[in-house]
Amino acid sequence: MAAHQEKKLAEERKHQNMQNDTKASQGQWGRAWEVDWFSLASILFLLMFAPLIVYYFIMSCAQYQCSLTDPLLDLLTGNKHLSDIWNRTPMLTYRAAAIYSLWVTFQVFLYVSIPDFCHKFFPGYVGGVQEGAVTPAGVVNKYEINGLQAWIITHVLWFANASCFHFFSPTIIFDNWIPLLWCANILGYAVSTFAMIKGYFFPTNAKDCKFTGNFFYDYMMGIEFNPRIGKWFDFKLFFNGRPGIVAWTLINLSFAAKQQELYGEVTNSMILVNVLQGIYVLDFFWNEAWYLKTIDICHDHFGWYLGWGDCVWLPYLYTLQGLYLVYHPVQLCTAYAAGVLTLGLLGYYIFRMTNHQKDLFRRTNGNCRIWGKKPEYIECSYMSVDGTKYYSKLMTSGFWGWARHFNYTGDLMGSLAYCLACGLEHMLPYFYIVYMTILLTHRCLRDEHRCSSKYGKDWKRYTAAVPYRLLPGIF
Ligand code: NDP
């Protein structure tokens, strides 16, 4: 009986492997060819609850001093009704709509109208027109990389206003935080819906569209791979980086200004959060060209996950630490603050060096030195839909020999540091590390599924050479 079952299992595994290899050879990597019940359930859950989760966090700060349990207790004990909470929530205002429209229009202007000049001044910075990776249809898109410039111009104007012009208060973002949330939601839903319609009726590249036949999956995960308007307005690059990530540092600065206004000082915890997250944001823009080779741009299609996520989830939930510190100004003792700073910088170092090693390795096609030695790697091949065969390499030395996603491990260390900067009194600031752990673990599995379909048996050789995903010896 056991032998019979084992034989059946072996046959099933063989069949599955053959299917994977066929998909790999037909260039099906990067497309979901079936939507399993778990993916569908997760998608429906997120579509229904993600906007509520964001609202719950922001409302709990505004109405319950950032307590995550008190609103629930109030509702469960009948102390308050949903309508009581809702009636105390600020609505959309003309002022917020004007601020938000101006903000997005300004970022669109910076993105499409001013070609990059930073690469002419900053040695080592890669900006201007750059090429992305090969898409499943075999297309290589060109991008205008000018995010660093947009970030600098925006922040120079912000500081000029705060110190000289005083057109608006630097607390403007905090003061309109919930009305701006409604604006961000309107944009997030509008752009995701537009992307879906565009995918059906006027895609930028029809061969790079993915139709699973499931409406919800397609809406959430996207149909078009690289939707564009005109030659240069790329939805993924724009919405991923701006307006959300440019705003991240401004939001934190606005929270710091609010602390100053309310308490007459900015706490060291707020400075830590501003500095550590500021490094992360600046790193993102300094390496925007490298970012073209990451999963978001290389492999994900553009749907609600990226469109709404970049407009709402990112600016509202990645900045919870700063928001929390407005309501709870924590002054850390020097030793604790130094420990958090060290963890944050170490995490950042690992994150950057791991990403840098892969980038260098891929750019030089393996002709480089990693930790003073020639890198070790596995040769692999894959095919695009038109049947063209491509060759690639998977590095098995440096940080990439320690684990298959050690860059995520560094990112998680940095994320933990942001949370620890808020002290140990409250749950809310720790949402970020919980979320990042789920996001990056899921991303790891998603990426490996895709790579396995793309590289087939070569991927198996790679996982045998580097057996762990995030933590050597553990996972
Ligand atoms: P990676 O940069 O790890 O890219 C994964 C891809 O790299 C794979 O699909 C594969 O692509 C290639 N690859 C995998 N293993 C190797 C290897 N050994 N040698 C060479 N190439 C390899 O993942 P992400 O794009 O997800 O992440 C980029 C960074 O962004 C990470 O540091 C992550 O922490 C961060 N991030 C942050 C988020 C946030 O919200 N703060 C969200 C997501 C990511 P190929 O098909 O080309 O072989």
Image: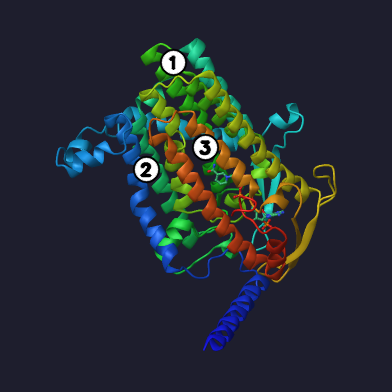
Colouring of the image: rainbow
Please name the residue that numbered disc 2 is placed on.
186
Q: Is residue 125 left or right of residue 244?
A: right
Q: Residue farthest to the left?
A: 78
> Of the residues shown, which amino acid type is indicated by label 2?
Ile
Q: Position of residue 451 (x, y in %)?
A: 64, 62
Whether residues under marks 3 and 2 lie with C-beta atoms below 8 angstroms apart, the answer is no
Secondary element under disc 2, as helix, strand or loop, is: helix
Q: Nearer the viewer, residue 321 or 106?
A: 321
Marked residue nearer the N-terminal end (3 or 2):
2
Q: How many marks overall? A: 3
CA gap between label 3 and label 1 equals 36 Å
Q: What is the spatial separation of the Cα atoms under label 3 and label 2, in whole angstroms?
A: 31 Å
Q: Position of residue 314 (x, y in %)?
A: 47, 40
- Left or right? Give the position of 330 relative to 160: left
Amino acid type of disc 1? Phe
**Residue that label 3 marks:** 416
Name the residue type under label 3: Leu
Res 47 quadrant in image? bottom left
> Can residue 232 be seen at all in this image of the molecule?
no
Tell me, yes or no, whether the two marked residues, 1 and 2, touch with CB atoms within 8 Å. no
Element under label 1? loop
N-terminal-most mark, 1 or 2: 1
Q: Nearer the viewer, mark 3 or mark 2?
A: 3
Residue 264 coordinates in the image, percent (x, y)? 40, 11
Q: Which mark is residue 167?
A: 1
Up-down relation of residue 349 to residue 266 (above or below): below
> Which residue: 35% across, 44% down?
53
Judge the density around disc 2: few (<14), some (14-19), many (≥20) Cα neighbours within 10 Å: some
Image quadrant for the C terminus? bottom right
Q: Residue at x 70, y 71 (%)?
A: 387
